[in-house]
Amino acid sequence: MRIPFFLVAFASACASSTVQADMWSPSGNWQMSGWAMVSKGLTAQCPMTIDFAVPSPGSTASATPSFFGPHCFFFMERPYLAELQPDGTTLTLHDVVMVGISSGGCSGDLSGQWDNVAKTLTIDTIVPTDTPGTDDCFIQAVLTLNSPSAGSIVP
């Protein structure tokens, strides 16, 4: 039986467009920490930590970010899905919800640039306000992978 060329071409195109999962290794509990500059009307410098749960090598991680300090954001509805984007450097925490510093909250994706050699996450992002008439949430931070010290995230 001969298979028409257009079916072979269609099947090939579908196979090549499949999404590949990011690879977190090793599995277990991860932690990144550092200092962050946060702003929503007011600006503050806050210690920031992100705890990750990696259930098995190659699986998607869940992330629980937190700030410490009186003028910092508070994250709601945690944990969040954490994924390394196909570019291999953008690490995204999906659908974060934050409140604090001033009136209103913010919700959306929080992304930063992952350096798999230096084991750092550099965040310079805006999470949009979810309250009309209030400021967006700005976060700038450099977080270092504390554990596992040789952890790797690759596309």
Image (cartoon, rainbow, N blue to C red):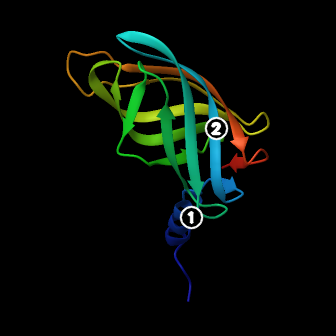
In the image, residue 92 above or below residue 81: above
- Element assignment for label 1: helix
| Relative image position of residue 140 (x, y in whole percent) | 54, 20
What residue appears at the point 79 percent right and 37 percent down from the top-left corner?
117
Numbered disc total: 2
Left or right: 15 in relation to 130: right
In the image, residue 51 above or below residue 131: below
Cβ–Cβ below 8 Å for labels 2 and 1?
no
Question: Residue at label 2?
Answer: 32
Image mark for residue 37: none
Residue at the farthest left position: 132
Left or right: 22 in relation to 107: right
Instruction: Judge depth for marks 2 and 1 and give the one in front.
Output: 2
Could you say which quadrant of the image residue 116 lies in?
Answer: top right
Crowd tier of the residue under label 1, counting other residues whose Cα lies within 10 Å: few below 14, some 14–19, many 20 or above? few
| Relative image position of residue 21 (x, y in whole percent) | 59, 57
| Relative image position of residue 86 (x, y in whole percent) | 60, 45
Q: Nearer the viewer, residue 3 or 83?
A: 83
* Quadrant (top left/top right/bottom left/bottom right) for the N terminus: bottom right
Give the CA separation, mark 2 to mark 1.
Answer: 35 Å
Q: Which of 24 and 68 is in front in this view?
A: 68
Q: What residue type is labelled 1?
A: Ala
Left or right: 148 in relation to 35: right
| Relative image position of residue 153 (x, y in whole percent) | 68, 48
- Element assignment for label 2: strand
Question: Residue at label 1?
Answer: 15
What residue appears at the point 66 percent right and 41 percent down from the top-left corner?
88
Residue at the farthest bottom position: 1
Residue at the farthest front position: 70
